[in-house]
Image: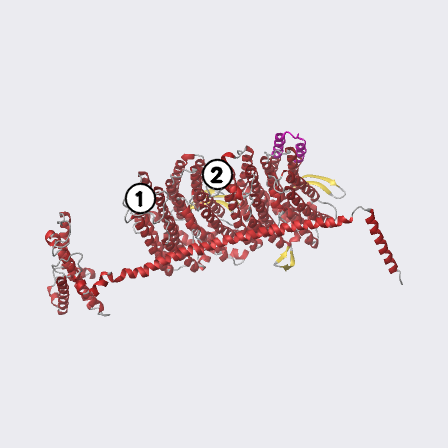
Amino acid sequence: MLSWSIYISFAGALIAALVPKGKPAAARWWALAVSVAGLVLAVAGYAAGFGAGREVIVDVLWVPSMGVHFLLAADGISRVLVLLTGIAAVAGVLFSWNVELRTNQFFAFYLALIGGVYGVFLSGDLFLLFVFYEVAIVPKYFLISIWGSTRREYGAMKLALYSFVGSAMVLIGLLAAYTTAGSHSTALADLAHAGLPVSFQMWCFPLVFVGFAILAGMWPFHTWAPTGHVAAPTAASMLLAGVVMKLGAYGCLRVGIGLFPHGLDPWGFSFLGLGSWRDVFAWLAVIGIVYGALVALAQTDFKFVIGYSSVSHMGFVLLGLMTLNQIGLDGAVLQMFSHGVIAGLLFAIVGRVVYDRTHTRQFAELEPMHLSRRLPFAAWAFVVAGVASMGLPGFSGFVAELQVLVGAWKANPWWTIVSGIGIIVGVAYIWRAMQKAFFTDALPTPHELESEQTHKFPPITWPEIAGVALLGISTLVVGLYPRILLDSIEPAVKALLAGGAQ
Amino acid sequence: MNGLTTGFPILTLLTVLPLVGAAIALFSGKHARGVALLTSLACLVVALMVWTRLPADGSIGLVELHPWAPSIGIDYHLGVDGLGALMLVLSAIVTLMSVDAAHRVHHMPGLFYGLVLILEAGLFGSFTALNFFHWFLFWELSLIPAFFLIKLWGGPRRGSAATQFFIYTMAGSVALLLSFLAIFLATGSMDFVQLAAMAASGALSQMVTAHLGAVMPWLAIGVLAGFAVKVPLVPFHTWLPAAYAEAPSPVTMLLTGGMSKMGVYGLLRIALPIFGVQIAAMRTPLLVLAVLTVVMGAWAAAAQKDLKRVFAYSSVNHLGYCLLGIFALAVPVYGAAAQASQAAALNGVILQMFNHGITAAAIFWFIAMIQFRTGGLRGIDDFGGLRNPAPVLTGLMGIVLFSSLGLPGLNSFVSEFLIFRGVFPLAWVAATISVLGLLVTAIVILTVIQKVFSGPVPEHWANFPDLHHSEKVALAPVIALMFIIGLAPRLILDTINPTVVNLLAHWRF
Amino acid sequence: MGGLRADMPLTFATYAIAMLALCGFPIFFSGFWSKDGILEAAQHWSVAKGPFYLLVFGAVLTAFYMMRQVSYVFLGYWRGRKVAHESPAVMTLPMTVLAFFAMALGLIGTPAWPWFHAFLEGRAATFDLRSFAQPAWLMLLATSSLVVFLGLGLGWWFYGNKSPQPEEPDALEISAPWLWAPLHDRLYVDEFYGVTVIAFFAWWARVADWLDRRVWGGIVVAVAWLFGLWAQFNRFLDVNWVDGGFDKTCEELSSGGGLLASVQTGRVQNYLRILAVAVVALAIILFWSSRP
């Protein structure tokens, strides 16, 4: 059933492209229908598979001579991420309700991107995963370069280049693994049990991991993220931060750790205090957490703050992956979901609710606008999104960070302590952004009051309210009752850890 | 673990009630104050019901226990003993006082009273929680309404005061969180009751050392850091004077009457039971800091020219007595006399939490009244001779000020006496130096009385309005309470003492 | 004031009784017996005799200043502005009662009937006039009385019935100005307090405030500022090095590509030139390798 989410997304993309140019309303309603259908399928598939283990949905031999299967499978992790994609997709459509330029093409690319993402999360075959992964990059480029804002061509090209470099690295690793395993099959399960030699894994793992981690925003390969997010239109940045970065993390987990677990073993020697690839990537992740937070603190553009905050939060995901224990990996997956929703909400508010009305993202220009009075919906929605982002208990981010930090304590206490600094800085940059953008202390001057009257903002529309509600409720529900996701994630992670030990 | 609820889930009701009230108040416009008054009155009634239903032996009662997310140690575990119940009653009283004092809020009243009620829910939640997740949730959550109450209705430098308050407290909270996560890793439990039992039997440090090495002292420091900022403990207190001064006075009442007690409560519920041995090992530097808090808090109050800042520092001083009592009793004792001293100190600390809560809130209430009558003035030199045009105000505020001073016959005397009675045998050097705090506080308060109420009346204050009837009616119960506790402290001590004995029996130093 | 003996006779009478009791006028006034008991105890104190002499001196002074005060207020003539009149019964009645006790309470202190002493020691009190007869005790009795008379006499001699005007100097001031000045300024105790205790208090208050604003507060501000600095540094690093590094690499690649591309000019002459060079090079190599 879950596989239908892929099919209808692509089909929907195709049909959206065929919608006549002059009817934007038709295109957006169609996109909404398709994404809602995808969400419904995701929820239904999630509920049906709740507590169940890995199930194979489709297994068709695709390229028999190479052993490539069209294999779609879902375990708890996949189901959770498919659910995330469904939510993010619907939210993205809602926040793109005001796109007027070439609406049909916009939603065509959008739905194609969604389809690719669904495909990655449901792939059980490495080759298929790679195909969907690449498929997701192309629409992204167009979404940014055509419908984006600040330096959009540059941002789109940068994103594409970084992604392709990463994909190239993954491809090399993929081919190497395939051949080393005997060139029988590219199914993930087969490759995992192929008994790849440890020395091979030692070089293949970092290659593949870095390849995927580039898209996950690991420091120092992260700079595409802020530029790309800022350049992208609202829905694209929501998806970029919310879902596409998770593709990278998912690849790190499913392919990197799943196929090459011994790549994380200690080297036997210690270099600068690092004794394994695990140490290297964990420290890069921790650096990403603190660094991303610090740079966010120094920004003058509202959207850049959120862009860097994505880098910081993805650091938590990568750190969780590197803990290699049950609770840390649980936290990593939960953080993928949590950040996906929260980042989506943040970008939606900054992009759609604020920027589309104020036409500026610079704090210096937003401060005199006294947005807490003129856009109270945006202000208070941002407060909720902001506190969720900083990891306040009651929202999903706290549970995820809690698990990652416990996992990190287990693995190496220093990772936890340095990440703690990142959390404090996280509080600081969110609070700074919130105050500068919405809640200034200064009272409005008569001149400002006058310009407020002459330049009234368009009212808040129902899609914006619906989108904020959808995302806000998602993070709140998971934050207050984390078992709703954890009960799916935990068995899947357990199986992955057990299966990895060959 | 099966769910367990002894009877009606009254503690959940108590926590949910203000949230419901807040939701209604947010959309009530100018009726928001009425909604808030009704809600806080209802909460007071429920809190008093909780007070009367405590188990007689001082153990934790009214327990609600349901599994929530067992794989990460999270349970829905609520319960109160004498300490918790007293704090609930205090929070309810202080919120009621605050709502009553805030009748001049005209700017976005719905939001104001909504935030006040959410803050009240935060207080209730953190005083009834017995699982770290639940407790931490309310601990952090209460910061949000407090921040916005200062930020949106405060004085000229409200932005920086509110931001410093928020981020400083959060930084301490992160240290606390990290330490607790380490404890969770070692023990698999986030339950305060279980962890306290493990600490008492020595199993806790064994488990932590097995998992993480000799980090227990560091974890204790991390946990103490969180509370040191909140209570506050000098020198982590610098957020307080600015926050108290810039906040509108009704909000200051909540900050000093309720939120500061969250820190002391946390020390008693979490730090001492779980990290008793480590705290006992660090007792001397902690006592030094507590004495500094008492003495420097009082002396800094003497140097202030703004009435709100005077009493902000005075709050630091009064909370210092609580810290003094807490750290003094953190020592292994043998013999009935020493145990009696510990019990006296702990009784004093708990009673002082309550007393200071209502006294400090009342002081800021009076300052609010003075501010309203003078168009916002609150400098210590701005007034003079108010005794003549406003004798009732003088009299009642005088009573409250003398209560803060610790005059026998009023409430604070009993608690301060108990604390010193307990601390002198256990840490006489600290006690002796802290007596300076009493002296300096007396000088400060008498100076305030002299400058504000005595002396010649300046021309422009000749028509200073005295208290209205409604204000007298609102203040009367609070002042009566001060006398009642001062003259018949048994009413509270009889319920607290079994809890004190119970707590001390289970704490291991 | 002055001359109130005539205007307020009852007040004068009760006041005089009280004053004499305070001074310790012998036998009939209670103050005498209590002071006497203390003097006796001081006299027999084995540690030092100093307190006894100081107490005696104090008794002299007491009588002196009380006499001065009574002269100023009740003796002489009225120097005030309005007319003085006696207090109403609601005041004079209690005063009378108190004056009565000022005399009568002495009875429970006499050695003849040591009721209070016995009460404190927990034994029965016996009335025994013979206790008056001990010589040492009589000596003390005489001394105390002498002391009181001396003080009262001195006071009368200095002040008596004279009623100096308010602006005139005090009698003691005229005769012993060197003594008068420090006494008038209360032996400079208040100034001493002001310079020591109060100055110390104010100084500490300023220190506490300074510590708070500049030191503890300053540290917090410094930490926040440092983080801000670190943030700016990281941002600089990101924009110029990490990001810039990537951009630079891309530029290098493009120009490198351009360099390579410049080889593919598409012009036949260039290719022929390269071919020619290659053939020559190949010929040289072949020639060189075929040499023996």
Please give the chain letter of the residue carrying mark 2: A
Q: Is residue A66 left or right of residue A336?
A: right
Crowd band around label 1 with a 10 angstrom C-alpha radius: few (<14), some (14–19), many (20+): few
For the residue pair C125 and B477, the one nearer the viewer reads as B477
Which span of residues is magenta-colored?
A: A9-37
Is disc 1 in contact with disc 2, using a CB cutoff of under 8 Å? Answer: no
Q: Residue at x 68, y 42 (%)?
A: A134
* Residue A15 lies within the magenta run: yes
Residue position marked by numbered label 2 in the rendering: A447
Residue position marked by numbered label 1 in the rendering: B460
Q: Is residue B36 left or right of residue C174?
A: right
What is the magenta segment's predominant secondary structure? helix
Question: Are tags 1 and 2 found on a single chain?
Answer: no
Q: Quadrant of residue A5?
A: top right
Under mark 2, the amino acid is His
Under mark 1, the amino acid is His
Q: Is residue C202 above or below residue A119?
A: below
